[in-house]
Image: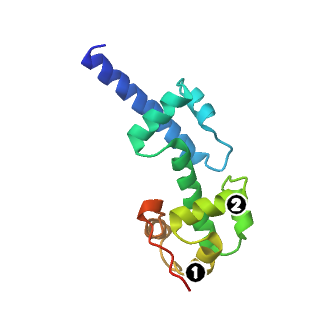
Amino acid sequence: MTSKAAEAQYLRDLARLRRVRDRMDREYAQPLDVEALARSVNMSAGHFSRQFRRAYGESPYGYLMTRRIERAMALLRRGDLSVTDVCFAVGCSSLGTFSSRFTALVGVPPSVYRRRATGATAGMPSCVAKQVTRPVRNREARPASRA
């Protein structure tokens, strides 16, 4: 394959990956799995996962869970839903997995986050609140203080 052909294929793959990423952003609360996402862009699951990680720096599952946790953070800040309700509202089917992933990304369990964040962003435009409260990767999270 020539370098021009390889570059053209790479750009086509990026466009397909972008469509999948946009779908994940829109349908985060739906049951999505890597195999189905890969099939939707005519790639094998392994190739899709490798290309997605290469393009976006994380696995498709990691990206999807980050979107779900971001939405969960917004719902928890509202304060009118329980942690369990939020878990299911963002598309997670296991409260334990949701709680451990939330804790890994945010640095505190969802119940603690809800207690601390309720009202913390009051009066702040939602676009600013989303940026200020955006979760970070586990390796970047500050250790939880012991109370």
Q: How far from the left and from the top, in percent, is residue 29?
A: 66, 50
Report the residue marked by disc 2: 96
Q: In which quarter of the image is residue 56?
A: top left
Furthest-front residue in this view: 146
Toward the viewer: 65 or 100? 100
Toward the viewer: 8 or 139? 139
Q: In this view, does 144 lie above or below 36?
A: below
Of mark 1 and mark 2, the one earlier in the sequence is 2
Residue at position x 74%, y 64% from top? 85
Furthest-bottom residue in this view: 147
Kindly state the secondary structure of the residue where label 1 is placed: helix
Q: How far from the left and from the top, in percent, is residue 70?
A: 54, 60
Furthest-left residue in this view: 3
The colour scheme of the drawn protein is rainbow
Report the residue marked by disc 1: 116
Distance (Cα) linking label 1 and label 2: 21 Å
Kindly state the secondary structure of the residue where label 2 is placed: helix
Residue at position x 48%, y 28% from top? 47
In the rendered structure, which amino acid carries the disc numbered 1?
Answer: Arg
Residue at position x 66%, y 75% from top? 79
Quadrant where the image shows the N terminus: top left
Foreground tag (1 vs 2): 2
